[in-house]
Image (cartoon, rainbow, N blue to C red):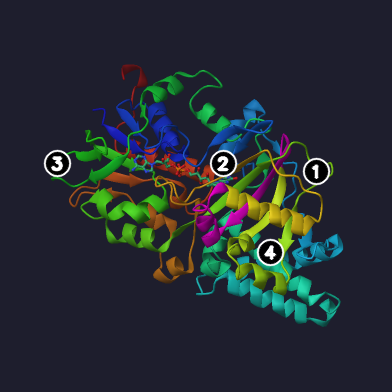
Amino acid sequence: MDPKIVIIGAGVAGIAAARKLLERGFRNILVLEAENRIGGRIQTIPFGANVVDLGAQWCHGEGTNAVYQLARQYNLLQVAKVNYHRFDCIQSNGESVPTQLTDYLIVLIKGILKAAEVDFKNPNGISLGAYLSKRYAELLDDPKNSHIDREIASQFLEMYMKFECSYTAADSLSDISGFGYCTYLETEGNQHLSWKNKGFSTLLDILMGKYNGDTIGRLLKRRILLKKKVKKILWNAGENSKVLIKCENEDVIEADHVICTVSLGVLKECHKHLFSPELPLHNLRAIESLKLGTVNKLFLEFEKAFWPINWNGFNLLWSEEDLTRITQSKDRWLEDVFGFYPVDYQPNVLCGWILGENARYVESLPENEILDGLMFLLRKFLGWNVPCPLRFKPTKWYTNSNFRGSYSYFTLKAEQAGVTPADLARPVSRHSAALPVLLFAGEATHESYYSTVHGAIETGWREANRIASFYPARNKSHL
Ligand SMILES: Cc1cc2nc3c(=O)[nH]c(=O)nc-3n(C[C@H](O)[C@H](O)[C@H](O)COP(=O)(O)OP(=O)(O)OC[C@H]3O[C@@H](n4cnc5c(N)ncnc54)[C@H](O)[C@@H]3O)c2cc1C
């Protein structure tokens, strides 16, 4: 028997699942994708002198990292030129903060986060934000730190919390479970490997067999249907019946197994009408208590660079007075733009980053209004003669109903509910049979690499292998 397996979503988890099933000899596979392209939150577009990544940008780690393993034989990755852990900071009055001070403060913060690994071995109801703020204040009260300028130290912590939120995609570190934060594991090696002048979609080319011309890639391409948005999955129409998948164009597709890879944001918004009957309680509780946050990038292309060679960009430190003024103005969203950095292989492009509630809000603004705000920031903080850019490209991951955000994080609410990404990943079987009919993959279902591409890939493989484990090993030549 060659079971019919339908995969919903041609993001990297869906592609990885389909590829693994094909490698294991399954052929009756279909991937349904709502967008008119594959890749999901991996999206590389031409911009400036080269390309930019609207979504995933770096391979976070080497060693066993699935992205690294797939790319390494083609020599496609290199350490990013910008050092995101250098924290060159400028205050809102235009003064640069001495590197000696920022280096000192970052050592304090890194020490606290290291200690967190021990303090959060078990769930304890404390958020990462509360923990970090308390420990930081204690360290600053220590007489050996009396030389530190308290005002700058406090502005630095505010900035750092936003920076950390950009990694976790949380609106605020107070929303992140300290315990949950420590369940995220880094793969060993450099955390910022870039795709040189090519962009992250090169990974999709590898998975689609374009790099080695493999037959699996060709088989996979024929099985992906674009612009096929799924509106309903009837997973328990009867004891021995198939799963029915209804698409927005009214097509109905039958399947023995469905692997659903849509984002946590889509699940949150749609689960009530997407699944019939309703999902089991453990899946529901995970959908409700884990979160998909929003991080957006704001790309600015200038006629020529107005910054020095080898400039590392800067992080914004607001004085209390300036912050109050901006948060009381119509441009209050600007407080959550925490840094601007050059982009590799793009001599004239800067990328600003914004997160949280304001990242969602900014998506609703006209582009010229966003641009005016960004120019205000650059001129105010840098104090340089900043020319108007030639082109501007803001990302909009929240507004797009096929994503509803950027990446997932482990909330305090999830910790309190005793929920982990493993609950989201639990496959659904019909009452009397162990054979799973509805399975979940996607970054938010990975227990330790959630929020990443390598995590998403592993979840696709996991669910493909789960299905394969219910069938005898397949003789590929006969399929
Ligand atoms: C701004 C940003 C920066 C990031 N930076 C990094 C980074 O540097 N490194 C890193 O490792 N990760 C990064 N990530 C995270 C990474 O992109 C994701 O973790 C990963 O791509 C998720 O893959 P996925 O397959 O789980 O989900 P998705 O990519 O969301 O794929 C799900 C697919 O399902 C489709 N879909 C949704 N609803 C339906 C429906 N009803 N019917 C059919 N199809 C549907 C969607 O269109 C989508 O293609 C970043 C993400 C963003 C947004």
Asked whether residue 159 appears in the rendered view, the answer is: yes
Spatial separation of the CA atoms under disc 3 and disc 4: 56 Å
Which amino acid, mark 4?
Answer: Met
Spatial separation of the CA atoms under disc 2 and disc 3: 43 Å
- Local secondary structure at mark 4: helix
Q: Nearer the viewer, residue 162 or 351?
A: 351
From the Cβ of disc 2, is ligand 1 less than 8 Å away?
yes
- Local secondary structure at mark 3: loop
Q: Nearer the viewer, residue 316 or 222?
A: 316
* Disc 4 target residue: 159
Q: Nearer the viewer, residue 307 or 439?
A: 307
- Image quadrant occupied by the C terminus: top left
Give the number of the mark in front: 1 or 4. Answer: 1
Classify 203 as above or below 134: above
Q: Residue at x 45, y 50 (%)?
A: 399
Which amino acid, mark 3?
Answer: Asn
- Tell me: 385 left or right of 426: right
Residue 146 numbered mark, or none: none
* Disc 1 target residue: 306
- What percent of the width, then of the height, locates residue 434? 24, 47
Q: Is residue 68 magenta?
A: no
Q: Residue at x 58, y 69 (%)?
A: 128
Q: Which residues are magenta?
A: 343-367
* Disc 3 target residue: 240
Task: Compare marks 4 and 2 and give the one earlier in the sequence.
Answer: 2
- Image quadrant occupied by the N terminus: top left
Residue 54 numbered mark, or none: 2
